[in-house]
Structures are given as structure tokens and as C-alpha cells.
Amino acid sequence: MGDKGVGAMLSREAILDQLREFLGEMFEIPPERVTLEARLYQDLDLDSIDAVDLVVKLQEVTGQRIRPEAFKAVRTVGDVVDCVEELLAVNAAARP
């Protein structure tokens, strides 16, 4: 996401590809395990500290603050994609 311009509207597939890259780099999760249906905690074995690290990374690349209460509802990779889409839409709307 960072290389393509933070405010750029990316497709769900592009966001998913970036998440695969981040999760692979940060937690050594094989990309084939990162599907929209994959559950962060049960399927990908992330814990709450890993989730915080992921939120920090997403905030860096989107340039938007993620409210903790908004991320509490995130359970699957698809939920993360939805969250990133919303952040990018807010960022794009804020541009002059």
C-alpha cells in the first residue's frame, strides 16, 4: 500500500495481497493461509499483541488512526480488508 500511494483506492485483491505480504514479513504466515475467510486468532494463530502490531502497521500505511473499538470487531482477514478499505476511503475523501 505504501508504494502505490497511501491515498490511492486499492482493490480488495490488492489490499489482500498487501496483507499477505505484511503477515508473512511480520509473523511468517505463508501467503496461501491468508484468505478472506481466515480467522486471525484461530486460523492464523495471532494473539492480541500481534493484532496491535498489525494495527500499527495498517495505521502507518494508510495514514489513518484506527480506533481500538473499531478493530475489536475484526475477526477475519476479510474484516481487516474492509477496515483498510474504509480508512483509504476516508483518506481519499480528505484530500483536496
Image (cartoon, rainbow, N blue to C red):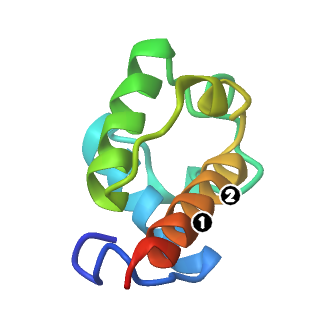
> Hey, what amino acid is under mark 1?
Glu
In the picture of the structure, the residue carrying the numbered disc 1 is 85
Farthest-out residue, front: 96
The secondary structure type at the circle numbered 1 is helix
Q: Residue at x 61, y 32 (%)?
A: 71
> Hey, what amino acid is under mark 2?
Asp
Q: Residue at x 73, y 29 (%)?
A: 73
On screen, 15 above or below 8?
A: above
Real-space CA distance between mark 1 and mark 2, rounded to the nearest whole angstrom: 5 Å
In what quadrant of the picture does the N terminus appear?
bottom left
Left or right: residue 15 versus residue 13 is left
In what quadrant of the picture does the C terminus appear?
bottom left
On screen, 15 above or below 87?
A: below
Instruction: Determine crowd level at label 2: few under 14, some 14-19, many 20+ residues with C-alpha closer than 10 A.
Output: some
Q: Indicate the position of residue 4 as horizontal and vertical percent values.
A: 29, 84
Instruction: Determine crowd level at label 1: few under 14, some 14-19, many 20+ residues with C-alpha closer than 10 A.
Output: some
The secondary structure type at the circle numbered 2 is helix
Question: Are the residues flagged by discs 1 and 2 in contact, CB closer than 8 Å?
Answer: yes
Q: Indicate the position of residue 61 as horizontal and vertical percent values.
A: 30, 58
Q: Residue at x 60, y 65 (%)?
A: 85
Label drawn at residue 47: none
Residue 22 visible? The answer is yes
In the picture of the structure, the residue carrying the numbered disc 2 is 82
Q: Residue at x 39, y 79 (%)?
A: 95
